[in-house]
Amino acid sequence: MRRHQKIAHQGLRDYPCDKCAKKFGRESHLLIHQMMVHEGRKDYECLNCQKKFGNKSDLLRHQKIVHENRKDYACYKCEKKFGHKHNLLFHRKAVHEGR
């Protein structure tokens, strides 16, 4: 719990990447970063379309949005739904805030 508080709430980053300027709060996150970004590894493959991903969470998100057509992010002003949160935020700014 203390480690979580230091990492998540105080920004503790004790594990720097030796190939770039990025720092991580957990060694496991550093190792995943190095495998995906610097080694280009993509060990998780979608069985539906053969697209490959560097981590399991990205694969699961892809399957949910692309193959299950899930759209979990709804605009509170017009009810339009999106698969990605960043698309919802862009929609709100562009359509409802006039930016």
Image (tube, rainbow, N blue to C red):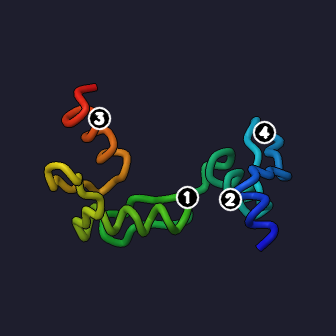
The residue positioned 23% from the left and 27% from the top of the image is: 98
- Measured as percent of width and height from the top left, residue 9 is found at 70, 56
Residue of label 1: 54
Q: Which three-letter amino acid code belongs to the residue tagged 1?
A: Gly
Q: Is 17 on the left or on the right of 35, as rendered? A: right
> Image quarter for residue 46?
bottom left
Secondary structure at numbered mark 2: helix
Marks 1 and 3: in contact by CB < 8 Å? no
Real-space Cα separation, disc 2 to disc 3, in angstroms: 33 Å
Secondary structure at numbered mark 3: helix
Q: In which quarter of the image is the N terminus?
A: bottom right
| Figure check: 41 above or below 96 | below
Disc with the residue nearer the chain's start (4 vs 2):
4
> Circle 4: is it few (<14), some (14-19), or many (20+) Cα within 10 Å?
few
Q: Nearer the viewer, mark 3 or mark 4?
A: 3
Disc with the residue nearer the chain's start (2 vs 3):
2
Residue of label 3: 93
Label number found at residue 32: 2
> Circle 3: is it few (<14), some (14-19), or many (20+) Cα within 10 Å?
few
Q: Which three-letter amino acid code belongs to the residue tagged 2?
A: Ile
Q: Is 35 on the left or on the right of 92, as rendered? A: right
Real-space Cα separation, disc 3 to disc 4, in angstroms: 36 Å
| Figure check: 41 above or below 72 | above
Q: Which three-letter amino acid code belongs to the residue tagged 4?
A: Lys
- Measured as percent of width and height from the top left, residue 18 is found at 83, 42
Marks 2 and 1: in contact by CB < 8 Å? yes
Q: Is 1 on the left or on the right of 68, as rendered? A: right
Residue of label 4: 19
| Figure check: 27 above or below 75 | below
- Measured as percent of width and height from the top left, residue 66 is found at 27, 61
Q: Which three-letter amino acid code belongs to the residue tagged 3?
A: Lys
Disc with the residue nearer the chain's start (1 vs 4):
4
